[in-house]
Image: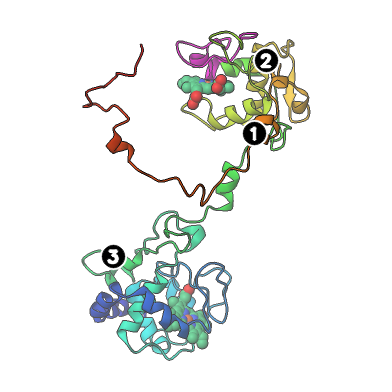
């Protein structure tokens, strides 16, 4: 019946009133209605195909296209002819599954009450497809489905709402996205990608991509960060903290450059280029002196930065002062403590209009 555009148009017109009802459906009531569907359909986190397809993201989906489900031929053909599940088309299908798509395999008498159909549709709209809903899934405008759209724009229910988390916002990150972010390198070299690069290669890159800010020799242009030098300055009044004078581990250099540099064009270097530029930074910091030196994943962990030994594990919990202190109290502490005044009332912080502004300043 939905195979021709004119049939869809007729259905669309016939459903103008139910559309309205669907748009105002109550998802909480719909949850109860869904019990009738649950014998065959799952929805929500981890939903799987059962007798019927899983229904996450069904709103906005072309009929007969949930991956991995074996649909009947008529259902697949209805999708191919342009049937997209919207509040309107669902309303028609759920009212009379058998007759609205002849020969489809949903053996269900249908929901006779328009309010039930609206409510269950509102309930389904809560469950966007987690992996595929980067942008709100707009129903595809297909020749057959377009005329069924109400003139006043898409019904609110055509935008699936995320089904996870406290606020039902956003979506679950895809495996690819997690992999793209998961690039940290640890001090022992764990997480380094395969690759290699020499000091000489790094010099060319550094001159092109880094020197405009960091200077040809890492000395820093203007107020951009200095990347080399500063040896022996840590005890001075103004210590010059650079990779060579201060940083404990080379892994931080690789990780930082790969993740954040060149400033404004982050992630534009290949892994080999990051090895090369890291090798050049070692050269600028006199950690290696041979411009033929090649840095790779294999020899990375052997390179030691001069200041590593001055970083120590945090031993404060064992120090006498802290060791003598009892466990910090986190709840129901000191019953005698009472809040007697609020800082704002006390006016402890001189504000812009306060008479004693700046009174505590000495400079
Ligand atoms: C007795 C089992 C059964 C019940 C109960 C049932 N369905 Fe179905 N449903 C199916 C089957 C099987 C299909 C696939 C039909 C086909 O391939 O022709 C289907 C298909 C659908 C589709 C189309 C999905 C797609 O991806 O194209 C929707 C939407 C749907 N059902 C919603 C519901 C709702 C909402 C209810 C409850 C009000 C319900 N169903 C009750 C078995 C059932
Ligand atoms: C457009 C200017 C610019 C360019 C080009 C640039 N950087 Fe940077 N770099 C910065 C700024 C700004 C910071 C400090 C960022 C911050 O602290 O948030 C920085 C920080 C660094 C640091 C950390 C310094 C420290 O002590 O904290 C390293 C290492 C570094 N850049 C390497 C590079 C390398 C290698 C390149 C070329 C591939 C490069 N940068 C290109 C502006 C630049």
Q: Which label lies toward us, 2 or 1?
A: 1
230 drawn magenta? yes
| Label disc, if present, on residue 122 of the rendered structure | none
Image position, residue 21 (x, y; %):
27, 77
Which residue was labeled with disc 2?
200
What segment is highlighted magenta in the picture?
Answer: 207-233
What separation in Å lies between label 3 and label 1 (alpha carbons)?
A: 63 Å
Above or below: residue 70 compared with residue 328: below
- Residue 345, quarter of the rendered image: top left
Q: Which residue is mark 3?
A: 154
Answer with mark 2 or mark 1, whichever residue precedes in sequence: 2
Q: Dot 2, how many residues are within 10 Å of its Cα: few (below 14), some (14-19), or many (20+)?
A: some
Cα distance in 3D space between marks 2 and 1 = 50 Å
Query: Would residue 217 be counted in the magenta stretch?
Result: yes
Visible in this render: residue 74?
A: no
Residue at disc 3, secondary structure:
loop
């Amino acid at each position: 019946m939905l195979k021709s555009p004119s049939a869809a148009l007729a259905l669309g017109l016939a459903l103008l009133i139910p559309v309205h009802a669907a748009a105002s459906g109550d998802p909480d009531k719909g949850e109860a209605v869904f019990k009738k569907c649950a014998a065959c359909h799952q929805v929500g986190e981890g939903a799987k195909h059962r007798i019927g397809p899983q229904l996450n993201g069904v709103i906005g989906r072309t009929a007969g296209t949930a991956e991995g489900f074996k649909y009947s031929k008529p259902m697949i053909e209805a999708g191919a002819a342009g049937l997209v599940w919207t509040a309107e088309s669902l309303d028609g299908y759920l009212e009379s599954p058998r007759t609205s798509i002849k020969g489809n395999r949903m053996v269900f008498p249908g929901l006779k009450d328009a309010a039930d159909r609206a409510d269950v549709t509102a309930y389904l709209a809560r469950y966007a497809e987690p992996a595929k809903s980067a942008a709100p899934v707009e129903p595809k405008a297909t020749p057959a489905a377009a005329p069924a759209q109400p003139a006043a724009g898409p019904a609110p229910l055509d935008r699936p709402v995320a089904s996870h988390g406290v606020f039902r916002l956003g979506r679950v990150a895809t495996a690819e996205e997690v992999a793209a972010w998961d690039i940290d390198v640890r001090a022992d070299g764990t997480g380094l990608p395969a690759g290699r690069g020499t000091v000489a290669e790094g010099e060319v890159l550094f001159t092109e991509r880094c020197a405009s800010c960091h200077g040809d020799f890492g000395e820093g242009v203007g107020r951009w960060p200095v990347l080399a030098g500063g040896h022996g300055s840590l005890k001075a009044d103004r210590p010059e903290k650079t990779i060579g004078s201060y940083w404990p581990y080379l892994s931080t250099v690789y990780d930082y450059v790969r993740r954040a540099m060149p400033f404004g064009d982050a992630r534009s270097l290949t892994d080999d280029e990051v090895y090369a530029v890291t090798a050049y930074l070692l050269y600028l910091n006199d950690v290696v002196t041979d411009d033929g030196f090649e840095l790779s994943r294999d020899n990375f962990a052997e390179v030691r930065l001069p200041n590593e030994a001055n970083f120590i594990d945090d031993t404060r919990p064992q120090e006498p002062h802290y060791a003598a202190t009892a466990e910090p109290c986190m709840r129901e502490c000191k019953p005698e403590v009472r809040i007697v005044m609020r800082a704002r009332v006390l006016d402890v912080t001189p504000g812009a209009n306060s008479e004693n502004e700046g009174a505590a300043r000495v400079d």
